[in-house]
């Protein structure tokens, strides 16, 4: 039974938060795109295209089918730790937010690949789906529409994540979820800083 003493509650929260942070980071660090490309071609995806392990770079090697497969797996990877935290520690909702933060850090800075991963878009949307499925689905649709019409995955990704805190607010989500979405939007935009530079120069690669 959890200790209901205030200091005991703080201790429990710190303990659980550390566990979920570590577990989420390790799950996020599983390099889905790297493993699939390595298994199918023997290539190191970090030496191809943008060097990212994400779905967009996987598409350059394996085509559209594997783009969607990796995107789905990365989204699932993002959702899993958050769902676990919500289910196993419902008395501490902040644990789900901690899991969400560390899973996207794990995806972008995976311990198994020396800190060189993807840009945490699919995993980020996965975390948001797990926190609030309505917001997650809307973001997925927004990303699809913007990417289709602009032909830039980076533009769709950045705009979708920037919209996330506003949608969370609209759906009356907890303040911690809104703050997480702000953090995720800033972090994902930062990870796309080179893409933004290429967009400004007209040199960004189009998805088709």
Image: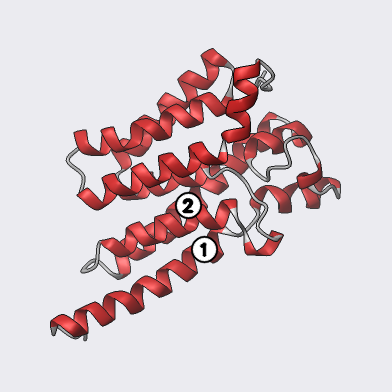
Q: Which mark is residue 57?
A: none
Name which quarter of the figure residue 41 lies in: top right
Instruction: Name the residue that disc number 1 marks.
Output: 25
| Residue drawn 65% across the image and 52% down it | 32
Name which quarter of the figure residue 48 lies in: top right
Query: Tag 1 or tag 2, which sits nearer the N-term?
Result: 1
Residue nearest the observer in this picture, 192 or 154: 192
Name which quarter of the figure residue 47 lies in: top right
Instruction: Name the residue that disc number 2 marks.
Output: 78
In x, y percent, where is residue 84?
38, 64
| Residue drawn 32% across the image and 76% down it | 14
| Residue drawn 49% across the image and 36% down it | 189
Give the CA distance from mark 2 to mark 1: 10 Å
Other-residue count near label 2 (Cα within 10 Å), few / some / many at <14 / 14–19 / ≥20: many
**Does residue 95 appear in this view?**
yes
In x, y percent, where is residue 93?
25, 62
Q: Is residue 139 above or below residue 83?
A: above
Say which quadrant the C terminus sits in: top right
Say which quadrant the N terminus sits in: bottom left
Q: Is residue 89 above or below residue 47?
A: below
| Residue drawn 84% across the image and 47% down it | 43
Extreme residue toward the left, this view: 5
């Amino acid at each position: 039974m959890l200790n209901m003493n205030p200091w005991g509650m703080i201790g429990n929260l710190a303990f659980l938060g550390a566990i979920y942070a570590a577990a989420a980071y390790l799950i996020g660090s599983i390099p889905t795109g790297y493993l699939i490309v390595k298994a199918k071609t023997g290539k190191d995806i970090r030496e191809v295209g943008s060097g990212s392990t994400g779905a967009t770079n996987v598409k350059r090697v394996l085509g559209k089918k594997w783009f969607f497969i990796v995107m789905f797996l990365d989204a699932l990877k993002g959702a899993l730790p958050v769902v676990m935290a919500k289910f196993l520690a419902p008395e501490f909702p902040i644990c789900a937010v901690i899991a969400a933060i560390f899973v996207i850090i794990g995806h972008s800075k995976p311990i198994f690949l020396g800190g060189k991963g993807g840009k945490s878009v699919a995993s980020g949307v996965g975390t948001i789906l797990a926190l609030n499925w309505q917001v997650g689905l809307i973001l997925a649709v927004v990303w699809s529409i913007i990417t289709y019409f602009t032909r830039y995955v980076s533009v769709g990704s950045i705009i979708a994540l920037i919209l996330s805190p506003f949608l969370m607010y609209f759906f009356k989500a907890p303040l911690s979820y809104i703050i997480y979405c702000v953090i995720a939007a800033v972090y994902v935009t930062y990870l796309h800083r080179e893409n933004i530079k290429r967009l400004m120069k007209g040199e960004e690669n189009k998805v088709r």
